[in-house]
Image (cartoon, rainbow, N blue to C red):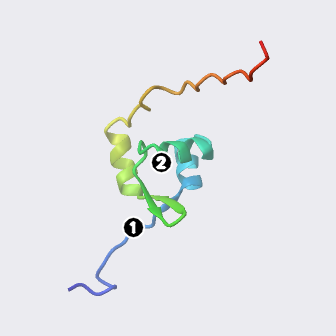
Amino acid sequence: MKTMEQVQIPKLLTLQETADLLRIRYWRAAELARRGVLPAIRLGRQTRVDPVRLKEFLDRGGQALPGGWRRRPREHAEGTA
């Protein structure tokens, strides 16, 4: 069994650090992580990204968001045109 000194754990990136690296906004990185597009790890309420897996993800060309980025149109409230 390995001791803690022998285990190499990479520094995990926050979503803000990931967003800065990818030059996207924080909320976009959070959405990509939530939808499983970015290789994210959940630690309780926090989300982290392994830089090694992020680089592999980018080297493969990334991944498109299923359905694209279009937002669903807002439904009109009753009685308004």
Few, some or many residues within 10 Å of mark 1 (<14, 14–19, 20+): few
x%, y% of residue 42? 46, 61
x%, y% of residue 32? 49, 42
Residue 12 is left or right of residue 6, and the answer is right
For the point 35% across and 44% down, the residue is 57
Secondary element at image label 1: loop
Q: In this view, does 14 lie above or below 67?
A: below
- State which quarter of the image contains the N terminus: bottom left
x%, y% of residue 37? 42, 42
Few, some or many residues within 10 Å of mark 2 (<14, 14–19, 20+): some
- State which quarter of the image contains the C terminus: top right
Residue 32 is left or right of residue 28, and the answer is left
Residue 36 is left or right of residue 13, and the answer is left
Extreme residue toward the right, this view:
80
Indicate the amino acid at tag 1: Pro
For the point 54% across and 43% down, the residue is 31
Q: Distance between the residues labelled 1 and 2?
A: 19 Å
Q: Which mark is residue 10?
A: 1
Q: Nearer the viewer, residue 28 or 35?
A: 35
x%, y% of residue 61? 35, 35
* Earlier sequence position, callout 1 versus callout 2: 1
Discs 1, 2 touching: Cβ within 8 Å: no
Indicate the amino acid at tag 2: Ala
Extreme residue toward the top, this view:
81
Secondary element at image label 2: helix
Q: Nearer the viewer, residue 62 or 55?
A: 62
Q: Is residue 10 above or below residue 64?
A: below
Q: Return the residue at label 2.
A: 33
Displayed quadrant of residue 50: bottom left
Displayed quadrant of residue 2: bottom left
